[in-house]
Amino acid sequence: MEKFDYYKNCPICSSRSLKAFKKNTFDIAHLDRDQIKITDHHYGRIWDLSLCQNCLHIFANPCPTPEFINSLYRGIEDPLYEEEAPGRSKNFLRILTYLEKLRPTEGTLFDVGAATGILLNIARERGWQPDGIEPSSWAVMVAEDKYHLQIREGFFEKAELEPNSCQAVTMVDFIEHTPRPVEAVAKAYEILSPDGILCLVTPDLRSLAARVAGKKWWHFRPAHLAYFSSKSLDTLLHRAGFKVLKNRKYSWTFSAHYLVSRKSWLHFLLKNIKIASFLKKIPIKLALGDSFEIYARRETKD
């Protein structure tokens, strides 16, 4: 199995005008599943990154092949992700509330990279028919056991899905993980019904928070294979047949316990059961403005 692809053209706009952007800070030869799980907290680890001077897209080069990276995602187990279900629910509720302003009539909502099904569970409670796909066998099992959701196990770009069968597709922190973003967005277009809505959330490396955090920005991690610009996102979506309706900043909500767990020098606090329990009850909203939250409508192609 080939592990890496090397790009001479931008994977978004196909321009050959590329230049080196940053040097890798971890050994890609020893990439493993623990380094790419959602709750990995070893911030500051990046691939060799190339910059497209045309659309300003930044991407791993070399980049793991779909076969290699998918083989790692298949075996991921991440219990800490599900422990944060209350905070993540608040994040997803904000997305669904705004999406429903654009698509007031519910139908089938397909979540790409559905993890343990937190977003789909909320969508179902709000009248949507839930559907989605997730590569982790463990996450699919949790979704069924905890939320009684039947999430497809596999990889979105290659999944056999009914065309025009969904009224909404959500990609929350997904597009930066796939080596084939153009294929992923094209697949979303294929399964959406006319005027269906795509919601996409992805980190913004050019945000103020990213610049302030510098090398230790929390989105610098091995799981992130690309960093989009407004221009590269517009290019990606327009070429696939979407019209951007709204581009706003994403807000996060986590428990104080989870945020403390991100910093190893604070772990002593979590060893005290009472303190740890108390911290889990404190929700903290982080309006960092360091992720795009985009809503786009499927347009009919000429």
Image: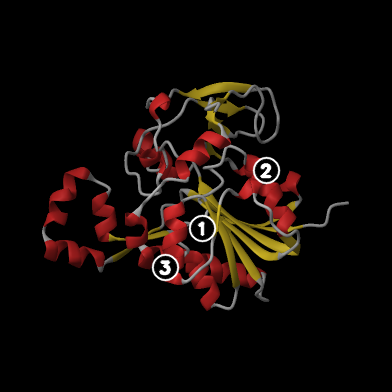
Q: Classify residue 59 as left or right of residue 105.
A: left
Distance from Cα at disc 2 to Cα at disc 1: 18 Å
| 28 or 215, nearer to the observer | 28
Distance from Cα at disc 2 to Cα at disc 3: 31 Å
Q: Residue at x 38, y 33 (%)?
A: 45
Tell me if residue 182 comes above or below residue 270 in the rendering.
above
Q: Which mark is residue 61?
A: none
- What residue is shown with label 3? 145
Q: Residue type at mark 1: give it.
A: Ala
- What residue is shown with label 1? 114
Callout 2 environment at 10 Å: few (<14), some (14 to 19), or many (20+)? some
- The label nearer to you, 2 versus 3, is 3
Q: Residue at x 24, y 46 (%)?
A: 263
Q: Name the secondary structure under disc 1.
A: loop
Picture coordinates of residue 32 (x, y %)? 39, 35
Picture coordinates of residue 110 (x, y %)? 61, 62
Q: Which callout, 1 or 3, points at the residue further toward the start of the chain?
A: 1
Q: Residue type at mark 3: give it.
A: Asp
Q: Could you tell me if the residues under marks 1 and 3 are in contact, i.e. CB atoms within 8 Å?
A: no
- Colour mode? secondary structure
- What residue is shown with label 2? 183
Picture coordinates of residue 238 (x, y %)? 73, 47
| 94 or 11, nearer to the observer | 11
Q: Residue type at mark 2: give it.
A: Glu
Q: Could you tell me if the residues under marks 2 and 3 are in contact, i.e. CB atoms within 8 Å?
A: no
Callout 3 environment at 10 Å: few (<14), some (14 to 19), or many (20+)? few
Q: Residue at x 42, y 31 (%)?
A: 46
